[in-house]
Amino acid sequence: MTTLTHVNHRGEAAMVDISEKGECQREALAYGFIQLQPETLNLIRENLVKKGDVYAVARVAAIQAIKRTWELIPLCHHIPLSAIEVDFDELENGVECSVKVKAFASTGVEMEALNGVQVSLLTIYDMCKAVDKQMVISNVHLVHKSKSQ
């Protein structure tokens, strides 16, 4: 069994020391889903949600959240990000969000990708809550992470 990396020798929460780790290309991909009523999907598709363009606002919200992950998650490092991609796919019962994050860094970017998915879906929820009282956010998960020299 492996030990927890964010715990020091006294069993206290601690930020991982990455000073000895070499920088390399890091990438992470995360997904999540928000269940929506068909009428809500139509309003989004036709850009009739009163708060504005749902996908545009949710995309910008995800990017902002990704850039601030280190401020929100106490033990995350501040990472110089290289690229962020936020995509939405409409399904018959909702919207799937995918977020890919890249960085040349000493630590991974999976928390940034997961944070981006969560905030994008919360933004969709916020923008549609007046018209859909049955929305459910689910299945937020890391799909892939990698590092390469």
Image (cartoon, rainbow, N blue to C red):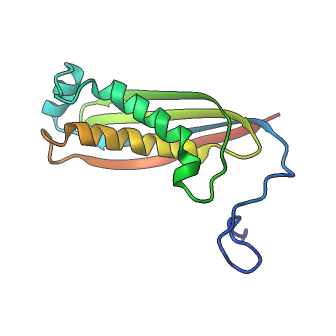
Q: Residue furthest front?
A: 71
Q: Point out residue 100 in the picture as x, y percentages from the top left corner.
A: 55, 33
Q: Nearer the viewer, residue 148 or 125?
A: 125
Indicate the quadrant containing the C terminus: top left, top right, bottom left or bottom right: top right
Apparent side of residue 87 relative to residue 105 in the rendered image (left or right):
left
Write the residue at 18% across / 43% down.
Answer: 129
**Which quadrant of the structure image shows residue 96?**
top left
Q: Name the residue rendered at 22%, 46% in the picture.
A: 135
Asked if residue 72 is positioned above or below residue 99 in the image, the reply reads below
The tally of labels here is: 0
Asked whether, in this view, residue 13 is left or right of residue 85, the answer is right
Q: Position of residue 46 (x, y in %)?
A: 19, 19
Query: Residue at the location (59% across, 49% down)?
Result: 70
Q: Is residue 31 visible?
A: no
Q: Residue at x 67, y 41 (%)?
A: 79
Choose between 49 and 28: the one closer to the eye.
Answer: 49
User: How far across and how far down the image is residue 132, in percent?
Assistant: 15, 42
Vertical arrangement, residue 37 with respect to residue 60, above or below: below
**Drawn side of residue 17 relative to residue 72, left or right:** right
Report if residue 56 is visible in the image: yes
Tell me the quadrant of the picture where the N terminus can be found.
Answer: bottom right
144 vs 141, left or right, is: right
Farthest-out residue, top: 46
Q: Position of residue 9 (x, y in %)?
A: 77, 77
